[in-house]
Image (cartoon, helix red, strand yellow):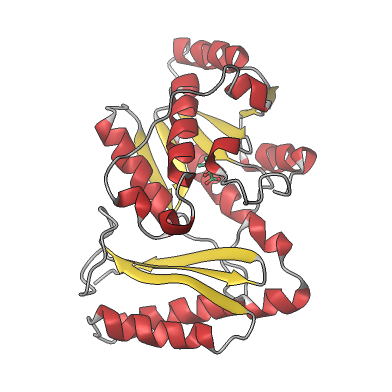
Amino acid sequence: MIIATTIQEVRDQVRAWRREGLTVGLVPTMGYLHEGHASLIRASAAACDRTVVSVFVNPTQFGPNEDLESYPRDFARDSALCEATGADLVFHPEVIEMYSHPADTFVEILSEMPKQLCGRTRPIHFRGVCTVVSKLFNIVLPDKAFFGEKDAQQLAIIRHMVRDMSYGIEIVGCPIVREADGLAISSRNTYLNPQERQAALCLSRSIALGKQMVQEGERDAAKVLQAMTEVLEKEPLARIDYVQAVDGISMEPVSELSQDVLVAMAVYIGKTRLIDNFSVRL
Ligand code: PAF
């Protein structure tokens, strides 16, 4: 497995693969890799001849009071996981390599879409995500790129950006990976102390209840969201940011739980903000 730190090295390697007629998959990550990322890398390795994993904590997607400095990092562990799961190249640039000039150019969706859900408390987040993902697409020029459904709004936004900007890249969404007790796997779970780790189960319990109500035929979003909210409110360490039902493409709030509606939540457990979701499948 190759470890590249410069854009030029990645371009040269991908060009060499292209000359051999090989297809290329990209898995963008911020490192501190876990089983969720492993599932993306495996999906790429299964679908493409070569897989590039980027490991880059992207400063432009963090707000001024967010966890950019404390975001967990462990590149030795990350590269071992990449190798074990079938990556061929890990791109691990310094910030100066990705943003070598003062960053004046951003990729931003101007509709309400990035302002909904997580955008309400993270106003510049999706502009940073779209910008760095665009840059990675331009550097790697992959055939396919793989993203987790846990970040459902991010996935919808990237699909939208790819369509608007005519990137010839197939975006593949991969299912949420959960711990044995239900907690959606996230790099931020490492922030939780043992008591908070236990409290964090209220998210997956609330998601499971919502899913079950939909399976049993409930279509009224307000009723399902109310029941889900009550589960969260029973947990003293939890503080709800949002629990919402939105159209799976536009992210606009909906009142009826029809096919592909996204039911999503963000909840603070102590200081740690966690997200979880499910999509309505009828
Ligand atoms: O999902 C993430 O880890 C990040 O938002 C991404 C897509 C790697 C962009 O920095």
Q: Where is residue 24 drawn, in percent x and y?
A: 47, 27
Considering only vertical position in the picture, is 28 above or below 181? above
Query: Is residue 93 at least partly visible in the picture?
Result: no
Q: Quadrant of residue 168?
A: top left
Residue 30 percent location from the top left of the image: 61, 42
- Depth check: 140 or 273 in front? 273
Nearer-the-camera pick, 31 or 82: 31
The answer, for residue 114, to whether it is visible in the render is: yes
Instruction: Determine the residue positioned at 59% across, 86% down.
Output: 235
Locate the N terminus and report the quarter of the image it occupies. Answer: top right
Q: Using the image, determine if residue 27 lies above or below residue 271.
A: above
Q: How many marks?
A: 0
Q: Position of residue 183 (x, y in %)?
A: 59, 71
| Residue lying at 66% horizontally and 39% vertically, measured from the top left | 82
Quarter containing the C terminus:
bottom left
Q: Which residue is situated farthest in the front direction here?
A: 64
- Residue that appears at 47% across and 44% down: 124
Q: Nearer the viewer, residue 263 or 108?
A: 108
Q: Residue at x 71, y 41 (%)?
A: 78
Q: Position of residue 208 (x, y in %)?
A: 45, 79
Is residue 277 depicted above or below 40 in this figure? below
User: Quick check: 165 left or right of 38?
Assistant: left
